[in-house]
Image (cartoon, rainbow, N blue to C red):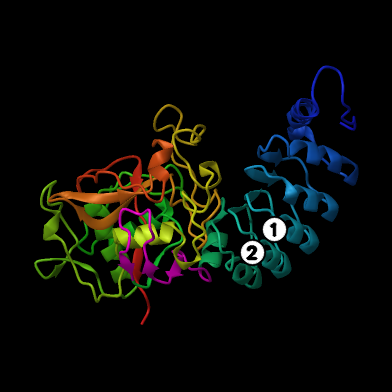
């Protein structure tokens, strides 16, 4: 692993770099130490753009950590048992997924540094102090603690489980099929509702009149919930509202909507209380305004970029999913791609998202495209024919929203 790259030999420079990177990549799993002398090799690996996994590496210098943070791959996984504040600070600078599944414990200082990481953070902590739990809970992205329920609960005591983003309203721009529509201020989920979030509200709903038990599926705790109908989604929103002491949005004949489907044709039976402060599905104009980046929009064609692979999971790039839903494709964990101008994730691709609006006399609007969709479906401007409200699809989920705080 110390051999340099030279021109000549019938290959151009890029071909040589790729060939060298493939050679280096093949030996990663066996490395037990990465010294400063291997920084050049790390730069070579950046050519591939793949994730890096060093499961046997237990110690890291700040120089190597800084170089790793510059690597543009999908994820970085390290087998570190302990980490210093300096190393944590360097690793926190990368934008992709950061996995530290073998950490045993972190100090409050290390937690403070890791909390600055903007992408998905996976930790494998065995124990955690109250101070460290308070600091790591400030992490703004997806945080997943593997294997220790007590540590997870300690963090979640300080962490908002369902983060919402404040969205300042405006008017939908030229090029939108909803051009000129005025959007008021509102709040919307930073991510699609995850399977973890779904299950916790469903568990609370038992014995409280809801019929959500056994409904909804997920390929992982941090994956979007799927196989939920429009009816399921709005009942979950009501349950979450009641759980948090908010006023419910959805009613049927003046009563809180907790049970029953009304079939493919009669979802109009479910009415919205516009003044309620509880959770609901976004209106279609709200969904599109948020996906476009709101008042911070840079005019991207997808939510957060003109390059779909940077921000979304669709048919062309969702292969290799942890659960094969079709042709080795499926959902991916939320927040693994780049967010948009408002800090919203997965609005292009991963799962279609239900909106409140009717589409004709019986259908309900869906937006955003999913893991099995063509790329055009993920455009922020695209409007497709809606779904029947009682349809449960493995490529459809939803995102919660609510009115702006008064």
Label of residue 92 in the image: 1
385 in relation to 106, above or below: above
Left or right relative to 58: residue 103 = left
Q: Residue furthest top?
A: 10
> Is disc 1 in contact with disc 2, using a CB cutoff of under 8 Å?
yes
Up the image or down, 277 lies above or below 198; here it is below
In this picture, residue 262 sits left or right of residue 59: left
| Viewer-side residue, 331 vs 374 | 374
Q: Nearer the viewer, residue 317 or 203?
A: 317
Residue lying furthest front: 174
Can you give x and y, in whole percent of width and height, for residue 397 in the image? 34, 49
Residue 172 in the image: x percent, y percent?
36, 62
Q: CA distance from mark 1 to mark 2?
A: 8 Å
Q: Is residue 166 magenta?
A: yes
| Residue 383, percent from left and from top | 31, 47
Name the secondary structure under disc 2.
loop
Q: Main secondary structure of the magenta part?
A: loop
Q: Quadrant of the C terminus?
A: bottom left
Q: Circle 2 is placed at which residue position?
A: 115
Residue 369 visible: yes
- Point out the stretch of residues depicted in magenta: 157-183
* Pick the front one: 294 or 54: 294
């Amino acid at each position: 692993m110390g051999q340099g790259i030279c021109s000549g030999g019938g290959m151009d420079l890029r071909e040589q770099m790729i060939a060298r990177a493939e050679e280096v990549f093949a030996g990663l799993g066996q490395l037990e130490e990465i010294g400063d002398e291997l920084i050049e090799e790390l730069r070579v690996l950046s050519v591939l753009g793949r994730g890096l996994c060093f499961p046997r590496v237990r110690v890291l210098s700040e120089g190597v950590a800084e170089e790793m943070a510059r690597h543009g791959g999908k994820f970085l996984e390290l087998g570190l048992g302990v980490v210093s504040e300096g190393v944590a600070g360097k690793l926190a600078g990368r934008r992709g997924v950061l996995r530290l599944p073998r950490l045993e414990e972190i100090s409050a200082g290390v937690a403070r540094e890791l909390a600055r990481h903007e992408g998905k953070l996976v930790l494998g902590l065995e124990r955690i102090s109250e101070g460290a739990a308070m600091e790591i809970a400030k992490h703004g992205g997806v945080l997943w603690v593997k294997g220790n329920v007590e540590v997870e609960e300690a963090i979640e005591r300080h962490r908002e489980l369902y983060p919402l983003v404040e969205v300042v309203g405006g008017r939908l721009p030229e090029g939108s099929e909803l051009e000129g529509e005025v959007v008021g201020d509102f709040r919307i989920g930073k991510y699609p509702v995850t399977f973890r979030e779904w299950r916790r509200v469903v568990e609370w709903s038992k014995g409280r009149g809801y019929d959500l038990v056994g409904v909804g599926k997920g390929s992982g705790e941090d994956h979007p919930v799927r196989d939920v109908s429009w009816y399921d989604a709005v009942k979950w929103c009501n349950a979450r509202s009641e759980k948090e002491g908010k006023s419910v949005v959805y009613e049927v004949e003046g009563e809180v909507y907790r049970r029953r489907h009304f079939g493919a044709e009669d979802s109009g039976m479910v009415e919205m209380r516009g003044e309620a402060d509880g959770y609901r599905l976004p209106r279609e104009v709200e969904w599109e305004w948020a996906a476009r980046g709101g008042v911070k929009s840079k005019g991207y064609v997808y939510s957060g970029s003109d390059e779909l692979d940077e921000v979304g999971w669709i048919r062309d790039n969702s292969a290799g999913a942890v659960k094969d839903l079709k042709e080795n494709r499926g959902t991916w964990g939320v927040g693994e791609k780049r967010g948009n101008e408002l800090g919203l994730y997965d609005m292009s691709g991963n799962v279609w998202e239900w909106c409140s609006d009717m589409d004709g006399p019986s259908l309900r609007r869906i937006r955003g495209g999913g893991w099995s969709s063509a790329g055009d479906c993920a455009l922020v401007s695209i409007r497709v024919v809606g779904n029947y409200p009682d349809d449960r699809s493995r490529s459809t989920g939803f995102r919660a929203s609510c009115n702006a705080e008064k």
